[in-house]
Image (spheres, helix red, strand yellow):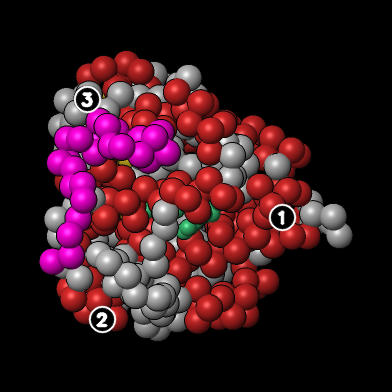
Amino acid sequence: MERSVVEKERISKLNAAPVRERGKYVLYWMQASVRALRNPALEYAVERANDADVPVLVVFGLFEKYPEASERHFAFLLECISDAGKQLEERGIEFVLVHQVPTTVVKALAADAVSVVTDRGYLRLLREWRSQVATEIDCRMVQIEGDVVVPVQLVSDKEETAARTIRPKIHKYMPKFLHPLERVTPKNTTGKAGMLASTLATLKEFELLDWRDPLAVLAKLDVDRSVPRVTWITGGATHAEAMLADFLKHKLKDFAANRNEPAQDFGSNMSPYLHYGGISVVHLVMEALKHKTSASKEGVDSFIEELVVRRELSMNLVFYNPHYDAYACIPNYARITLDEHRHDEREPTYTLQELEAGVTYDECWNACQREMVVRGKMHGYMRMYWAKKIIEWTSSPEEAYERCLLLNNRWELDGRDPNGYAGVAWSFGKHDQGWAERAIFGKVRYMNKQGLHRKFKMELYVNKIDKL
Ligand code: FAD
């Protein structure tokens, strides 16, 4: 294995093809880690390009038919892409945004590449795309895992049962991966090498999009516009850093105490950035640790628990469980108990349209549904309550499961993420334990409105959402 600033556990060769001797560039297929800063796949690509004395070409294939993606998702993604493009340009690294399914454009560009480097995605389609490209190209393809602290297969070689089983494994390896990623200077910048995308015959077959102008690109796309873009948050590492700075300064210290209070906005809001790989999770942990004092210890520990243990448990689920996006992924105890209670009376039941419109009898539930639809990000605590109520108001648990995934993935800016699949599964008993048996839920944990009112200032939350 070549020398690298990237830890060897993050590097995996996806095919046995050789490095091409006379390639024009090292191709970095950017897809899961949409950032130019603290991106191990990018640094690895620069190293390999320097070895071969060629430049790096970074490509992003924009596939407008990506499952369940809407205007809301594409707007944020394009902002991340634009930010990454600008930072790549500053380093003299050429970036092209191509209006095409990535597999097609990457296979075409691989014909002139020394080798192909890509980042790692865990969801089925992302894995399938990578293995398809790796088997069909005739130069080396290497994958770099850059969006978890501890590489998933190092943490565990099997699906973990719960946070308590994965936590010690993650903490054992975490220190090894918590260090700044060295930046590698490209020997051949675009200017020096004189290689412009416009000179590549292969790219002439494709439609190039202007990554500098996300709104113009968005206007061109044939996407679902019934889920409109949101403007309270902007994609890209620059905006993520600003939001992070605010969180570290004003919220982290009291994160443990306040994060669950729905009326307070004590979350970091990092989930949309993490979903698109717009910020490095290693960097987030290191920044949080810099703020660790005796007064903020609880807040920092709690943030790291969510950000690393919970999030990487989700990665473990989607990597090891082929049914991660289906009812079949819930544990036996939950399936059995929900089955035993499938004929329990449900009063009322709602149609999917009624749920989507947020017109139930429960003002707290309607508020969080509205928060998701209007703002594209539901409060973290309310997400649990939201899914539990869908179980209660739907005629079968299987249908409730489908509804949770559908609504979550459609409206949440951070939807279609391993955390979303794990969050829905958790609501149906995954990564949890059995509780006292009751109607409809059986032994699966139950939540009710009285509990919300007892613990939190729900009127404040409902009023706040009313004003959105
Ligand atoms: P913070 O509270 O600031 O936490 C920091 C980070 O820790 C988050 O960005 C996230 O990456 C991670 N994290 C926090 N809570 C969890 C958790 N319970 N499980 C795993 N990781 C967590 N998260 C998504 O990213 N996308 C989803 O689609 C999604 N859907 C969910 C659906 C349900 C039914 C449930 C119960 C949870 C879901 N979550 C989802 C997990 C969690 O609610 C969100 O990650 C969190 O609310 C995001 O806000 P934040 O970035 O401000 O989080």
Crowding near the residue tagged with mark 3, few <14, some 14–19, many ≥20 C-alpha atoms within 10 Å: few
Would residue 107 be visible to someone looking at this image? no
Label 1, on which residue? 299
Q: Which residue is mark 2?
A: 332
Amino acid type at mark 1: Gly
What residue is at 86 percent from the left and 60 percent from the top?
294
**Residue 319: x, y in percent?**
33, 70
Locate residue 128: give its quadrant. Answer: bottom left
Quadrant housing the C terminus: top left
For label 2, the SS is: helix
Indicate which label's residue lies in the foreground, 3 or 2. Answer: 2
173 to the left or right of 139: right
- Circle 1 packing at 10 Å, graded few (<14), some (14-19), many (20+), is many
Q: Which residues are magenta?
A: 343-368
What's the residue type where badge 3 is placed?
Ser
Which percent across, then down, holds residue 8? 52, 73
Q: Does the Cβ of the disc 2 residue fall within 8 Å of ligand 1?
A: no
Does residue 114 lie above or below 212 as drawn? below
Read off the residue under disc 3.
226
Answer with mark 3 or mark 1, whichever residue precedes in sequence. 3
* Three-letter amino acid code of the residue under disc 2: Asn
Q: Say which of 305 and 188 sits in front.
A: 305
Q: Dot 2, crowdedness within 10 Å: few (<14), some or many (≥20)?
A: few
**How far apart are the two marked residues, 3 and 1, measured between alpha carbons?**
38 Å
The answer to if 362 sits in the magenta stretch is yes
User: CA gap, disc 1 to disc 2?
Assistant: 35 Å
Q: Which sits earlier in the primary sequence, circle 1 or circle 2?
A: 1
Which residue is rendered at x = 51% and y = 26% of the image? 463
Give residue 207's quadrant in the image. top left
Residue positioned most to the right: 294
